[in-house]
Image: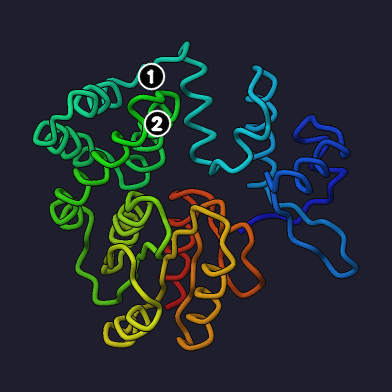
């Protein structure tokens, strides 16, 4: 999916020193390159984009420690907000934030549907929802409650959205939120993208044990399982590895910053756009 680039090439493309890239990797795990034979760092074009975003945000005065664990989609959202003077210029985002801050769940559900029904699943997640979460991140009073309200509203409208994005598919892609993850939003969005990519996209919910995931994957003949790893967790990595070992032929995809720890054999994607690309290619070789 991505070219293999040396650290020297990446430093030139991202306009960063090699020392800075190494420091951001070792101290903050802001980027986690692959290792080629011999231990040499090998970067992807996605890593370059991430480093450019980090450089731009850091240059505006934000400490790297504050943003190192943000997903690439979240970094894009921070840049959009910064470019518009700290207030989103997207009318859809503004309406969603207004409903969240008013604690008006019926209105929030209506607004989510009105936005999602005219956008692709990737645009809805990577652009609109990522921007909403970014603005909530900068609102200390509304952040926690806002994320809970947004997650609750997405659950309420998810069945309608899945029908909107779903095609006549029999092959399932499961999306799951593992125990310890803070909210359901990434898993729900992954299910929507899976449905639009031509699969029976299913979100299994929160706190699902690996044995139950295995059973459902076998019963539904799932082609892939998308596991959100929003936090770096050894347990999450072990769960993903266990699923890969026990479900032969099922691709295990990790999303979120914790997915950057993924060992060989597990797929890690940085955004819904990358997830959609992976699933479309997987569908083509089915």
Q: Quadrant of the C terminus?
A: bottom left
Which residue corresponds to mark 1?
A: 88
- Which image quadrant for residue 276? bottom left
Up/down of 280 relative to 58, above or below? below
Residue pointed to by mark 2: 131
> What's the image's color scheme?
rainbow
Q: Is residue 224 left or right of residue 268?
A: left
- Secondary structure under tag 2 reads helix
Image position, residue 265 (x, y; %): 61, 75
Q: Earlier in the sequence, mark 2 or mark 1?
A: 1
Quadrant location, the N terminus = bottom right
Determine the residue positioned at 82% across, 65% down.
36
Q: Nearer the viewer, residue 131 or 1?
A: 131
Secondary structure category for the residue under label 1 = loop
- Dot 2 crowding, Cα within 10 Å, few <14, some 14–19, many 20+: many
Instruction: Tell me where residue 64 appears, x and y as whole percent.
Output: 68, 32
Across and down, in percent, residue 137 comes to 43, 30
């Amino acid at each position: 999916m991505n070219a293999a680039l040396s650290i020297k090439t990446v430093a030139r493309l991202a306009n960063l020193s090699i020392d800075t890239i190494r420091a951001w990797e070792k101290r903050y795990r802001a980027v986690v390159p692959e290792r080629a034979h011999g231990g040499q760092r090998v970067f992807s074009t996605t890593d370059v984009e991430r480093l450019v975003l980090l450089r731009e945000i850091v240059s505006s005065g934000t400490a790297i420690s504050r943003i190192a664990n943000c997903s690439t989609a979240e970094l894009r959202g921070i840049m959009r907000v910064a470019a518009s003077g700290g207030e989103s210029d997207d009318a859809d985002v503004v309406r969603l934030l207004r409903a969240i801050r008013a604690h008006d769940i019926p209105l929030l559900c209506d607004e989510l549907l009105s936005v999602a029904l005219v956008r692709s699943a990737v645009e809805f997640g990577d652009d609109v929802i990522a921007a909403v979460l970014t603005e909530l991140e900068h609102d200390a009073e509304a952040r926690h409650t806002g994320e809970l309200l947004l997650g609750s509203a997405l659950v309420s409208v998810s069945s309608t959205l899945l029908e909107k994005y779903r095609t006549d598919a029999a092959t399932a892609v499961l999306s799951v939120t593992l125990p310890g993850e803070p909210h359901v939003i990434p898993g729900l969005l992954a299910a929507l993208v899976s449905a639009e990519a031509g699969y029976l996209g299913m979100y299994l919910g929160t706190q699902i044990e690996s044995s139950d995931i295995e059973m459902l994957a076998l019963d539904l003949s799932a082609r892939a399982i998308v596991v959100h790893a929003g936090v770096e967790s050894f347990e999450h990595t072990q769960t993903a590895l266990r699923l890969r070992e026990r479900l032969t032929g099922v691709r295990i995809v990790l999303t979120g910053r914790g997915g950057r720890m993924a060992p060989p054999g597990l797929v890690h994607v940085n955004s819904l756009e990358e997830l959609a690309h992976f699933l479309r290619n997987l569908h083509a070789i089915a």
